[in-house]
Amino acid sequence: MRSDVFLADCPAHTTLNLVADTWAVVVVFGLGRGPLRYTELRGRIGGISNKMLTQTLRKLEHGKLVERRTLPTAPAGVEYRLTPLGQSLLGPVSVLAQWAEEHADELADSDGG
């Protein structure tokens, strides 16, 4: 049986809802080089608020794309890393990022209407 991404209850539709928003893509791409602490990740991602980063990380954790690990440091620290499933998303996300970079000028020139 083939999935129909246009149906609300389709598993592929649910998956796209998880990963197809701007911040989810940027966070996955940001964690692509390895684990980062929250403040390091926030510093790497321009324009994201603390609230939005926290919500995005929680959503990606719930979706099993990111894992949160408590570090044995004093004071206790936390780092985030991609799970193997999250790493499998790096290929498509990298292609999307490359496309965005290649077409940024064209998209910036459009007036949205």
Image: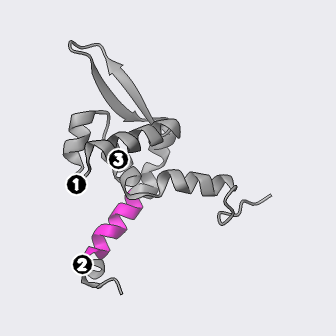
Q: State yes or no: discs 1 and 2 in contact (Cβ < 8 Å).
A: no
Q: Which residue is mark 1?
A: 47
Q: Is residue 71 above or below residue 43?
A: above
Please state which of the two labelled residues, at mark 3 or mark 1, is closer to the viewer: 1
The percent coordinates of residue 44 (x first, y second) are 21, 46
Q: Which residue is mark 2?
A: 105
Q: Residue at x 39, y 28 (%)?
A: 68
Q: Residue at x 48, y 40 (%)?
A: 65
> Which type of secondary structure does the marked residue at label 2 adopt?
helix
- Give the magenta range: 94-104
Q: State yes or no: discs 3 and 1 in contact (Cβ < 8 Å).
A: no
Q: Main secondary structure of the magenta part?
A: helix
Which amino acid, by three-letter code, is at mark 1? Answer: Gly
Quadrant the N terminus occupies = bottom right
Of callouts 1 and 2, the N-terminal one: 1
Query: How many tags in the picture?
Result: 3
Q: Is residue 79 above or below residue 22?
A: above
- How far apart marks 3 and 1 lie (CA) works out to 12 Å
Q: Residue at x 29, y 84 (%)?
A: 110
Q: Which residue is mark 3?
A: 27
Quadrant the C terminus occupies = bottom left
Instruction: Report which quarter residue 16 is drawn in.
Output: bottom right
